[in-house]
């Protein structure tokens, strides 16, 4: 395998490529390999062989002035090798759309098309952050280095709804069957009062990568688009994005096709087939226009995610506004207010939203490096500039909203803690009254019990009550500020009434 050998040799100077070499050797993510290597030999070899040969590729040829691209599907290694060895259609720009990755697909595409190994390296994992000892860390390159590369990688998330926990567990198993590493960020802490008890929403980490070889005098332009395999379990949140067409009016009398919504790969192929003539013509001038359809899907997924986060933040605000939904279920009688759950939900978004903002900002930087291309150079990719700007604005607004909710929640928490302290002080006050009553009684009883002969107290037993009760009442009145305040208030009111009476007597 010449391409694998090239990756291994290059990893001496570029250590981050060692992860790709290991990935190709074990045919999947090294973290998944830890679960596979313990299987029996025959079963392990069968799994490795299936993963290594996995191939699902669609090939599109875009020819200027033609109304639609031509399509070809490939599902095995041999057909892909034959296709790469055939001469391309004259004047056509070819796009290879690849679902998932495998060792054989990387070997064929990398060696035949002379692709930078880093293009595949950046696509095979989904880490959002790294530990200090992770060997697979991806350090950022200088912009002066990365700006000249003929490829880019976009990161986004796909919200997915699962009715039951069993459905969610099946989805995790399906993600484990992918060659590339893709995981689901479960949103279990944000259960809604209006959802089913076992329902959950997960955010699927996703990537899309595009490599382009520009056209030259001897060869046409070629593109390779890598997309993620799809989880079949559950379904897209709110049934997924809307079609990228205006709904027909009754007078149109036209027939239209429906996107399959069975997988991201099939949806993408559906929309590529619908590429209009003007976008096909734009590909000749700007090969990046081949990614227009996947960019539409990515932007739509970001809009769905922003709407979902808006709904969750609204639920948190609702919980803060309604005290009856903040009462602990285990202690309803005391009405002990507990904001821990709401604050935990809020802090989750305060941690995630900056990551989302950086993803969107990175996407905009890679897609729109020119701040003002002008109307003459505006193509289908340039028309998406405003849509991604809207997404970035939504993320910024949501981040600001979380900060405002955090400030309000902190203030309400302080108020609730003050109320709770007042209730505790009242309880301590009741204990103080009891001590005030019983302390004099204890003192008097101790004083009169100093005699050794108890029978001598039979004649003076009544003295205990005559002394203890008045003393207790006197001490109680001295420590009861409310009584003294009421007495002072009564005295002041009496003085005012007396002054009014004297004033009237003088007048009449």
Image: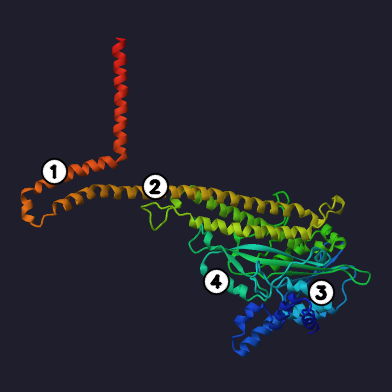
Task: Determine the image quadrant of residue 348.
Answer: bottom right
Alpha carbons under labels 4 and 2: distance apart: 47 Å
Alpha carbons under labels 4 and 1: distance apart: 77 Å
Q: Name the residue under label 2.
A: 422
Q: Earlier in the sequence, mark 3 or mark 1?
A: 3
Mark 1: few/some/many CA within 10 Å (<14, 14-19, 20+) = few
Query: In the image, 273: left or right of 460?
Result: right
Q: Which of marks 2 and 1 is nearer the N terminus?
A: 2
Q: Mark 1 points at which residue?
A: 466
Q: Nearer the viewer, residue 174 or 210?
A: 210
Q: Name the residue under label 3.
A: 115
Q: Which of marks 3 and 2 is nearer the N terminus?
A: 3
Alpha carbons under labels 2 and 1: distance apart: 37 Å
Task: Determine the image quadrant of residue 391.
Answer: bottom right
Q: Name the residue rendered at 79%, 83% in the picture.
A: 5
Q: In which quarter of the image is the C terminus?
A: top left
Q: Name the residue under label 4.
A: 169
Query: In the image, 154: left or right of 279?
Result: left
| 283 is higher (above) or lower (below) than 96 | above
Task: Determine the image quadrant of residue 85.
Answer: bottom right
């Amino acid at each position: 395998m010449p391409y694998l050998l090239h990756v291994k040799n290059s990893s001496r100077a570029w250590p981050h490529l060692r992860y790709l070499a290991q990935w190709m050797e074990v045919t999947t993510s090294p973290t998944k390999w830890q679960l596979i290597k313990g299987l029996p030999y025959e079963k392990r070899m069968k799994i490795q062989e299936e993963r290594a040969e996995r191939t699902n590729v669609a090939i599109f040829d875009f020819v200027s002035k033609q109304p639609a691209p031509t399509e070809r599907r490939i599902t095995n290694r041999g057909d892909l090798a034959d296709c790469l060895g055939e001469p391309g259609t004259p004047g056509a720009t070819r796009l290879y759309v690849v679902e998932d990755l495998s060792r054989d697909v990387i070997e064929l595409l990398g060696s035949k098309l002379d692709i930078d190994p880093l293009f595949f390296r950046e696509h095979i994992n989904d880490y959002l952050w790294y530990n200090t000892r992770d060997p697979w860390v991806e350090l950022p390159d200088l912009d002066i280095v990365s700006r000249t590369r003929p490829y880019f990688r976009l990161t986004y998330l796909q919200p997915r709804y699962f009715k039951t926990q069993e459905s969610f567990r099946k989805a995790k198993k399906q993600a484990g069957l992918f060659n590339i590493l893709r995981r689901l960020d479960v949103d279990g802490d944000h259960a809604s009062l209006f959802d089913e008890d076992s329902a959950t929403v997960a955010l699927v980490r996703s990537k899309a990568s595009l490599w382009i070889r520009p056209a030259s005098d001897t060869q046409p332009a070629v593109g390779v688009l890598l997309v993620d395999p799809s989880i079949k379990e559950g379904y897209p949140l709110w049934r997924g994005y809307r079609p990228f067409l205006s709904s027909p009016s009754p007078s149109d009398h036209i027939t239209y096709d429906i996107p399959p919504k069975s997988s991201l790969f099939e949806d993408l192929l559906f929309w590529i087939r619908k590429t209009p003539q003007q976008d096909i013509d734009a590909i000749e001038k700007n090969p990046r226009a081949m990614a227009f359809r996947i960019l539409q899907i990515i932007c739509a997924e970001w809009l769905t995610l922003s709407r979902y986060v808006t709904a969750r933040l609204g639920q948190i605000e609702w919980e803060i506004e309604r005290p009856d939904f903040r009462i602990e279920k285990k202690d309803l009688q005391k009405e002990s207010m507990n904001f821990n759950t709401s604050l935990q939900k809020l802090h989750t978004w305060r941690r995630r939203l900056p990551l989302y903002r950086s993803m969107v900002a990175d996407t905009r930087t890679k897609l729109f490096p020119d701040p003002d291309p002008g109307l003459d150079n505006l193509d289908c990719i340039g028309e998406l500039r405003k849509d991604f700007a809207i997404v970035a604005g939504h993320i910024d607004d949501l981040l600001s909203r979380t900060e405002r909710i955090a400030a309000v929640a902190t203030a309400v928490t302080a108020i609730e803690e003050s109320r709770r302290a007042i209730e505790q002080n009242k309880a301590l006050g009741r204990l103080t009254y009891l001590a005030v009553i019983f302390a004099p009684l204890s003192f008097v009883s101790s004083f009169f019990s100093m005699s050794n002969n108890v029978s001598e107290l039979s004649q003076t037993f009544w003295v205990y009550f005559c002394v203890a009760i008045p003393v207790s009442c006197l001490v109680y009145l001295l420590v009861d500020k409310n009584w003294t305040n009421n007495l002072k208030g009564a005295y002041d009111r009496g003085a005012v009434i007396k002054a009014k009476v004297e004033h009237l007597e003088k007048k009449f």
